[in-house]
Image: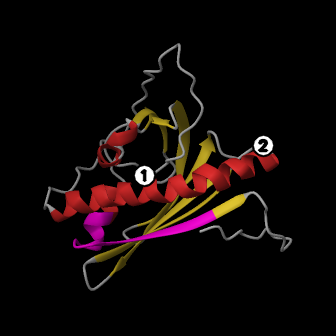
Amino acid sequence: MGRRPEHADGLADAVTVAFRVVTEIAAPVERVFALSLDIGAHERSMAGTDERAVAGTTSGTIGLGETVTWRARHFGIIWSMTSRITGLEAPGRFVDEQVRGPFARFRHEHRFEPSAVGTRMVDEIVFRAPLGPLGWSAERLALARYLPRLIAERNASLRDELERGDPPPRRGDGRRHDRDDRDDGQRAASSPSAS
């Protein structure tokens, strides 16, 4: 955590944070991959933040090129963030990236590798908060600590669901399901948890 990715010009971006979370799961790669793309499983894993899919693909399995808008409570504030699946190679990896939300940049690569236990799930997240030095302060003080813990909690929930032997998710019908249950009096910023 805390390493700064370099831009094409070779200079490190002073306001970018990258971290990695590795989770071992006693289940086949195909099941772990499928559950990781399931909207309902994501909502269950993020119940502590009341995260919900409110627009785009809101149920079933999200696919390549599809978007989902998440709404959740973090730091006492309602956030929303729209992510798109920009890469998908079943069952080895997929990538989601913010297209609208609170970050100047948010990219989450999910990788799934066979392991002695079953599956090694590797999450690599790179994000950059807006607002220059003020954003960097927010990253270092809150987000750089909060987000790895949030991803680890999400992964523990997925692991528990898979290791209990719950049936794999059903493939969605492929349609987009749009809904907007925004409370008019609530501020909608953006959710640090995209996946």
Q: Secondary structure at mark 1?
A: loop
Q: Name which residue type carries label 2.
A: Leu
**Residue 138 visible within the image:** yes
Mark 2 surroundings within 10 Å by alpha-carbon count, few (fewer than 14), some (14 through 19), many (20 or more): few
Q: Residue at x 59, y 57 (%)?
A: 144
| Mark 1 touches mark 2? (CB < 8 Å) | no
Q: Amino acid at mark 1?
A: Gly
Q: How many marks?
A: 2
Image quadrant in which you'd find residue 15: bottom right
Q: Earlier in the sequence, mark 1 or mark 2?
A: 1
Q: How is the image coloured?
A: secondary structure
Label 2 belongs to which residue? Answer: 131
Asked if the stretch drawn in magenta spans residue 21, the answer is: yes
* Disc assigned to residue 63: 1
Residue 99 spot, x, y in % from top left: 62, 44
Image coords of residue 125 (percent x, y): 56, 62
Residue 193 screen position, x and y as percent: 49, 47
Residue furthest toward the front?
A: 141
Residue at x-position 64% and y-position 67%: 2
Reply yes or no: does residue 14 show up in magenta.
no
Q: Which residues, given as a range, are shown in magenta? A: 18-32
